[in-house]
Amino acid sequence: MTNIYVFDPSALIALFRGNEKAFDLMREADAGQLQLIFPAVAVAEANSFIQASESAWEPVLMGRIECTPLTAHVAITVGPWPGDLAVRHVVYESRAVRCDIATLEPDRYRPWSVPLLLL
């Protein structure tokens, strides 16, 4: 069984900043050893800090990355949950596939009982 990790905004920012653990996960995903999920809301929040162009994101998003959309169903489900929208989307995706959340900000997940991978 392949390990799966959901990147939150802090993990995506870390990847752009050259974080070694984040980059290693990306490399393992490219090699087919694990799968990475990037929730679209996490990408949006990360990019509000990174300010990268679509062409800068392109090499990150190509390959074995699954960028999950915020569908109406997901939005309705996470609407009443605590936390900001990016956290709620990340938690939803983590629960949906029962996987760890890659993060540099574990305190964002205090109201939740979710597995975390600290980068």
Image: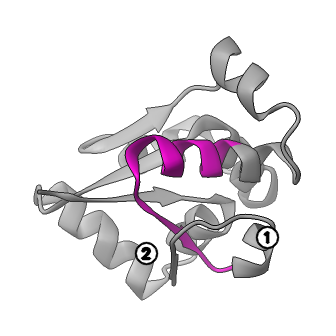
For label 1, the SS is: helix
Image vertical order of residue 116 relative to residue 70, above or below: below
Q: Which mark is residue 117?
A: none
**Horizontally, is 44 left or right of 31 in the view?**
right
Q: Tell me where residue 50 sits by quadrant.
A: bottom right
Task: Return the residue at label 2.
Answer: 22
Residue behind mark 1: 108
Closer mark to the observer between disc 2 and disc 1: 1
Q: Residue at the top extreme?
A: 72
Q: Range of the magenta residues?
A: 89-105
Amino acid at pointer 2 = Ala
Q: Position of residue 3 (x, y in %)?
A: 24, 62
Instruction: Tell me how far mark 2 sits from mark 1, CA to CA.
Output: 18 Å
2 left or right, relative to 46 = left
| Residue 81 is one of the magenta-drawn residues | no
Query: Which residue shows up at 53% across the image and 43% down it?
Result: 93
Q: Which residue: 88% across, 51% down? A: 82
